[in-house]
Amino acid sequence: MRKSIFFMLMLMSLSVWAQKKKKSEPVPAAQPQPQPTTPSTAKAPKDSLAPVNPLLRHYALKYQLAVQWNDYDIAKDALYDLIIENQGNDSTVIDLAGYYYQNQKYPSAVLVAQTLLKRNPKNASALEIAAIGYENLGVYDRALQHYESLYLLQNNTNVLYKMVALQVQLKRFREAAATADILLAAKDLDSLKVGYPMADGKQKDFALKVAALNLKGTVAMEQSDKVNAKKYFEQALAIAPDYPPAKDNLAKLK
């Protein structure tokens, strides 16, 4: 979240060297545009330097100081100021969505992300925030839709795992079985981890393959295929004997 604002500060400090397109058609300082290439012999007139927008600089410094001093309410206000002053900058809007997500204000995070998705349905950051937001709000069908769109963009194994889990949650067992097969065939599956809260309140990381096998077993169990369900639960426990979901599911079969 900080990177885009710091980047904006850098751009503003350098913007005094930017050329205008034409003296009669100045480029708005709040929305700097790329300049056409000019011959190397051409020189910009001294009076054609684009001015720095003082409000943008003020709000960006306000944001930087608020983050530095751990005052995130003021940082949020600065983000709103930046968005109003420079409404074409999606990176600032995604920072605001990220702020709401990090502070568990999921309705606001979803609404901001949806605004970005109306502008660009392939905005991966907005898709992820919307998916996580809907999931935390219990709107699992909308969360699944956004994870599916995100997976089509990124082919990300972690996103695929979230899809299987939500399909199971929504009792779409045929879809879940097919998606789980794709997940278990992922080349990077063995290198990925997933956290699970243990009985002592601490989170422990398990191989994602363990969670995937448990989901595959859950689908089989829900389809009354106890033989395959037991096989997948046992495969999961062979890798991680203390993985609670697989232990609990195996106990249900007995």
Image: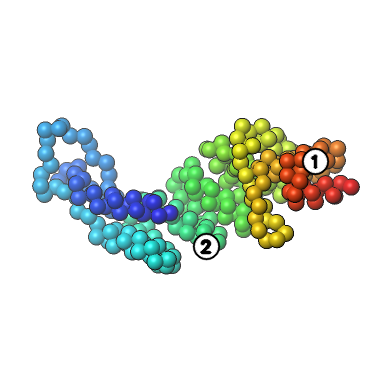
Image quarter of the N terminus? bottom left
* Front position in the image: 115 or 223: 223
Location of residue 198 in the rendering, given as x and y in whole percent from the top left corner: 70, 56
Q: Amino acid at mark 1?
A: Glu
* Residue at 52%, 38% in the rendered image: 153
**Residue 107, visible in the rendered structure:** no
Position above or below: 2 against 18? below
What separation in Å lies between label 1 and label 2 (alpha carbons)? 39 Å
* Front position in the image: 33 or 192: 192
Does label 1 or label 2 sit earlier along the sequence? Answer: 2
Q: Is residue 136 left or right of residue 33?
A: right
Location of residue 191 in the rendering, given as x and y in whole percent from the top left corner: 61, 38
Task: Determine which quarter of the picture holds residue 66.
Answer: bottom left
Q: Which residue is mark 1?
A: 234
Q: Is residue 63 left or right of residue 20?
A: right
Q: Amino acid at mark 2?
A: Asn
Task: Determine which quarter of the picture holds residue 223.
Answer: top right
Mark 1 touches mark 2? (CB < 8 Å): no
Q: Secondary structure at mark 2?
A: loop
Which label number is shown at residue 103?
A: 2
